[in-house]
Amino acid sequence: MPTLNMTDQVTPLELARRANAPEPYKIIELMRLKNEMLIDIPAYECNSGTIHKTTQRTIGPMGEHRIYNQGVGAVATQTKLIEDRTTMLGAYSRVDEAMLQHSGNRNAVRQSEAVGIIKGMGLTQAEACVNADKSKVFEFDGLKLRRNKVDNKYVFSAGGAGNKLTSIYIVAAGPDLFHFLYPQGSKSIGVERQDLGVHHVPQADNPEKSLPMAIEYFTAQYGICVRDPSALIRICNIPEDISGDKLIELIIEQVTSCLKARVLTPCTLMIQFLSNSTKPQATKPMWFIHRKIPGASRSPMCVTSAAVRWMLFSITKA
C-alpha cells in the first residue's frame, strides 16, 4: 500500500492504482459503474481491525473578534467517541468448465460472467451506503439511519405528505467529514478476487447430480464514516412531482447551510427514491437541475457549478 496521511483525499480507485493492485483496480472500476461514490469519495484505513474509532466534534467554537484592551472568552470544542464498522460483500462466479474449454477464449468467457456479477456488487454497495442497518450483524448504519428523525438539526422537511416521496442527502467528503473505510492492514483496499479452480458442485435444480465448475470469488470489505455531523444533511418529504425550480431552491438553501457550517466543497448529492410507485417521477427535476445550473456537465445525473459539485451516485426504491 502507498504511504498516506489524513490530508490525502484519495478515492478507492486511486488507492488501488497507487498500490499497484491490478485486480482490485479492475474490480473497483467495474463496481463504480453502478456506484460512482468510488470515484468521488475518499477512503481511509480503519484504525482498529475492521472497526474505525474516532472522535466526532459536536461543538466547534467560532472565536471572537477583539479590540485593544478588550479580551476574549475561553473556548473549547466538545466531542464524542464514535465507532464505525466495515462489512463484507461477496459473490461467487461459476462457469461450466466444459463451456470454457469449448469457447476458444477461456478468459473472455470468465470475464464476461464476472463483469455482470461485479457491477451488481457495486449496486448493492451503493444501496447499502444508504439503507444499511447495523442491527443486522452483517451491516453498518447507512445514511438513512444516521439521519432518520425530522427533529434532527441536520434533517430538513420539504413538507410533502403521503407515500410518494423522495429524499436528498447532501454529503461533504473529506478526511474529517464523510469518507469510506477499509479494513486495517489490507493490501488491496479490502477488494479481492480469488480463483478457486475447478470443483464439482451440485446441480442447482437437482442436488443429486454434479457438474464441473470453474469458480471465482469476489469480495469487497468497506464501511462509511461521518466524522463531522454537518457533513451529512438530509432533505426529506420531497414530493415526486416537485417542480425543478423548487427542488433547486431546496438544494441551494441546504448547500448554503453546509457552507455556513464551514463544511466546504466538494459536496456530493445523492437522490434516493422512497416511493411505492413503480415509476418515480423524480428524474424530471434532476433534468431541470442539469439544464438550469451553469456549467452542468458529464450527464443529466451529474451537476457541476463554479461553487459546488453535485453527483447523483445512487437511486433506490424503498
Image (cartoon, helix red, strand yellow):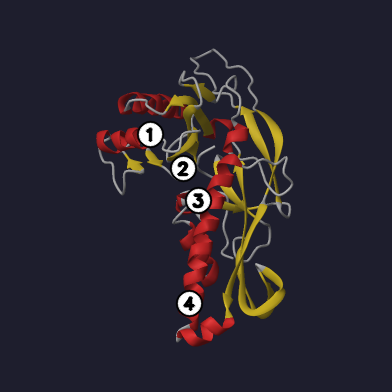
Q: Secondary structure at mark 2?
A: loop
164 with respect to 61 (left or right): left
50 with respect to 115 (left or right): right
Instruction: For residue 170, say whether it is visible.
Output: no
Q: Earlier in the sequence, mark 3 or mark 4?
A: 3
Q: Marks 2 and 1: which is nearer the front?
A: 1
Most extreme residue toward the top is: 70
Q: Earlier in the sequence, mark 4 or mark 2?
A: 4
> Can you identify the residue that label 2 sits on?
315
> Can you identify the residue that label 4 sits on?
109
> Can you identify the residue that label 3 sits on?
9
> Can you identify the residue that label 1 sits on?
281
Gap in Å between the C-alphas at discs 2 and 1?
12 Å
Image spot of residue 15 (x, y percent) = 52, 61
Q: Secondary structure at mark 4?
A: helix
Gap in Å between the C-alphas at discs 3 and 4?
36 Å
Gap in Å between the C-alphas at discs 4 and 1?
38 Å
Compared to 113, does 10 lie above or below? above
Labels 2 & 1 near each other (Cβ < 8 A)? no
Amino acid type, label 2: Ile
- In front of the other: 168 or 307: 168
* Residue plotted at (31% across, 34% down): 289
Amino acid type, label 3: Gln
* Residue plotted at (44% across, 56% down): 33
Image spot of residue 45 (x, y percent) = 63, 54
- In front of the other: 243 or 193: 243
Gap in Å between the C-alphas at discs 4 and 2?
30 Å
Q: Secondary structure at mark 1?
A: loop
